[in-house]
Image: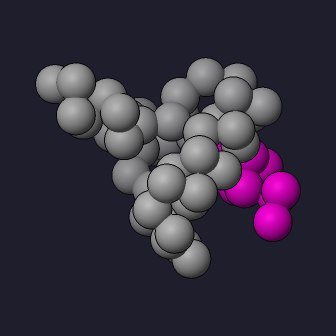
């Protein structure tokens, strides 16, 4: 459970942006794959919209 949580990014756009940057720094990744485990389609789309906003740092 802890290992899974360590790979997650959740919170405000600012918090997720910071977490994305940490993941990239730790792994050297040049891309991130996202999965929103949200059943409601509208809510899932909103999650991806917020994640896209968080990824605008690059």
52 sits to left or right of 8: right
What colouring style does the render use? one colour
Q: Residues in magenta? A: 49-58
Residue 56 shown in magenta: yes
Q: Nearer the viewer, residue 49 or 28?
A: 28
Q: Residue furthest left?
A: 1
Q: Nearer the viewer, residue 17 or 36?
A: 17
Question: Compared to 52, does 17 lie above or below?
Answer: above
Q: Residue at 56% of width from left, 77% of height from top? A: 30
The quarter of the image holding the N terminus is top left
Q: Position of residue 51 (x, y in %)?
A: 64, 47
Q: Position of residue 37 (x, y in %)?
A: 33, 39
Q: Residue at 51% of width from left, 69% of height from top? A: 28
Q: Image quarter for residue 38?
A: top left
Residue 48 visible from this viewpoint: no
Q: Position of residue 26 (x, y in %)?
A: 49, 54
State the predominant SS element of the stretch in magenta: helix
Question: Compared to 22, does 58 lie above or below?
Answer: below
Question: Compared to 3, does 48 lie above or below?
Answer: below
The quarter of the image holding the C terminus is bottom right
Q: Residue at 45% of width from left, 62% of height from top? A: 27
Q: Nearer the viewer, residue 18 or 42?
A: 18
Q: Position of residue 16 (x, y in %)?
A: 64, 36
How many numbered callouts? 0
Residue 35 visible from this viewpoint: yes
């Amino acid at each position: 459970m802890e290992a899974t949580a360590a790979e997650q990014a959740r919170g405000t756009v600012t918090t997720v942006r910071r977490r994305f940057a940490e993941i990239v720094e730790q792994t050297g990744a040049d891309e991130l794959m996202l999965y929103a485990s949200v059943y409601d389609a509208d809510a899932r789309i909103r999650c991806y919209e917020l994640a896209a906003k968080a990824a605008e740092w690059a």
